[in-house]
Amino acid sequence: MWHLEIDVKLKRELGMRADCFSMTWSRVIPDGVGDVNWHFMTAALGDMATIR
C-alpha cells in the first residue's frame, strides 16, 4: 500500500524518534460524503501498529 516500512527504516537510520502523518480525506471518505472507508482505515492503522 505505502512505502511505510522503508520510510520508517530510513527515519530510524537518521535518528528520528517521532513522526507525524496525515491521510487524505479522499481515502477516508472516498465519495466526499457518506460512509468511512473502514477497510482502508483498519489496514493503514494496522500496518502502522506493527512497525516499531
Image: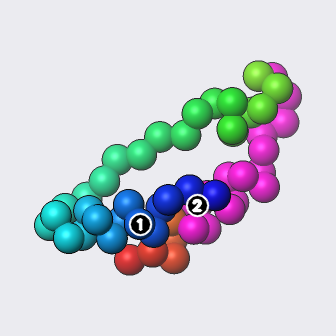
Residue 45: where, in percent of width, then height?
Answer: 58, 60
Q: Is residue 38 left or right of residue 15?
A: right
Tell me which amino acid carries mark 2.
Answer: Leu
Q: What element carries label 1?
A: helix
Q: Nearer the viewer, residue 31 or 5?
A: 5
User: Which mark identifies residue 6?
Assistant: 1
Q: Is residue 36 above or below residue 41?
A: above
Residue at x-position 69% and y-position 60%: 42
**What span is in magenta?**
33-47
Q: Is residue 17 visible?
A: no
Spatial separation of the CA atoms under disc 2 and disc 1: 16 Å
Front: mark 2 or 1: 1
Which image quarter holds the N terminus? bottom right
Tell me which amino acid carries mark 1.
Answer: Ile
Residue 9: where, in percent of width, then height?
Answer: 33, 70
Q: Main secondary structure of the magenta part?
A: helix
Neighbor class of circle 2 (other Cα within 10 Å; few <14, some 14-19, many 20+) is few
Residue 13: where, in percent of width, then height?
Answer: 20, 70
Q: Mark 2 sits on what residue? A: 45
Q: Is residue 45 above or below residue 38?
A: below
